Each structure stands twice: as structure tokens, then as C-alpha cells.
Image (cartoon, helix red, strand yellow):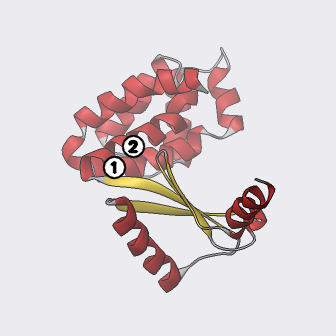
Amino acid sequence: MAEIATIARPYAEALFKVVKTQATQAAEWLDALAQVAADEGLQQFAHDPKVSHRQVLDLITQVGPKNLPAAAVNFLTLLLENGRLSALPEIAVQFHALVDAQTGVRKAVIHSAFPIEGAALDELTKVCEKRFGHKLNVQVALEPELIGGVRVVVGDEVLDTSVKARLEQMKVALTA
């Protein structure tokens, strides 16, 4: 998907520059638009040569988020005119990365064998923030094959305290 990322980057950066002071609000409507744009039926409708950009825009504003600001409508119009509606989900991902970089927040994925919620997740987040030295936007992914423990991925850093990793370490030590 490097091609989509390459296409999406300039759009995300341009939008970020335009809405810099209102990036949080923009992220909300951008996420909502990205969800709508990811619909396969809408993509087929948008690629139909008999359908105008205005018809696609009208459809999105009818089924998508209500009360879109002018910046959102203008951005959506630009994407439609340039045939880049399919890049909107990736634009949203890259826009979030820019917002996170501005606020000093990094994305973290906690892989766990069991669901982690509530106070346990809050405590684990605090420990991880201290360990990685950044405020973290945490997402939990279930991976039963870890058996127990967690594997935390922040950017290119990995903290693996899973039972599976410990068993692998023991296996290497015993066969060495």
C-alpha cells in the first residue's frame, strides 16, 4: 500500500496546515468521512462515469456526518475532483499521525492474550508511558497465541513480556 500512502501524504499535510488550530475537530469529521469513503458501494458509485462529483458529494453529505464545516466540504470536493476518494481512509491515518506528532502523543498497540479494559488498561498505559517516555494513544489487539503477558509496540520499539516470548527464550537457551 505504499502507493496509497504516497498519494495520501500531501493531502494529509495540506489539510493539517489549513486546520492546524482546529486539528482535533478536523480529525473527528475526517474519521467520519473516511468511514463513509471506505464503503465499497460508494466507491463503485463514485467511479461510475455517469455520476458527477456533485452527486457523490451530495450522497456523502446525506449519509455521512451532519453539519460538516466548510473546510470539510472543500476538502471532500478537492478529493472528488482529483479522483482521490479512495485515499481518504489513508489520509485520515496520516492526518492522525501529524496531530499526534504535534501533541507529543505516540500510537501504541498492546497485544494481549486476554481482553484488557478499565483500570487494568489505565495502569498498563501509565507503565508503558513511563517506559517509553511519551504520552501514548493505546489500542488493544487480542492475540491468544501469546498465552499470557503482553507485547507492546510503539513505533519501531517493542516490549515483549509475553509467555510465548519467554518460552522462545528458554528454547534458545536450552538448545544453545
Image location (x, y in percent) of residue 93: 47, 41
Q: As displayed, is residue 161 above or below residue 15?
A: below
The residue that appears at 65% across and 14% down in the rendered structure is 49
Does the CB distance between marks 1 and 2 fall below 8 Å?
A: yes
Given residues 113 and 66, the one toward you in this image is 113
Q: Which residue is mark 2?
A: 97
Image location (x, y in percent) of residue 84: 52, 23
Amino acid carrying mark 2 in the image: Ala
Secondary structure at badge 2 equals helix
The residue that appears at 53% across and 62% down in the rendered structure is 139
Q: Which residue is mark 1?
A: 100
Q: Dot 2, crowdedness within 10 Å: few (<14), some or many (≥20)?
A: some
The residue that appears at 61% across and 27% down in the rendered structure is 1
Among all residues in the image, which is located at the extreme left?
Answer: 21
Among all residues in the image, which is located at the extreme bottom?
Answer: 119
The residue that appears at 50% across and 77% down in the rendered structure is 121
Instruction: Tell me how far mark 1 sits from mark 2, CA to CA.
Output: 5 Å
Q: So how many labels did they put on this image?
A: 2
Amino acid carrying mark 1 in the image: Asp
Q: Is residue 55 visible?
A: no
Q: Is residue 67 left or right of residue 164?
A: left
Secondary structure at badge 1 equals helix
Given residues 155 and 101, the one toward you in this image is 155
Q: Quadrant of residue 98?
A: top left
Q: Is residue 30 left or right of residue 111?
A: left
Image location (x, y in percent) of residue 14: 30, 28
Q: As displayed, is residue 4 above or below residue 42?
A: above
Q: Quadrant of residue 94?
A: top left
Numbered circle sitting on residue 79: none
Q: Quadrant of residue 13?
A: top left
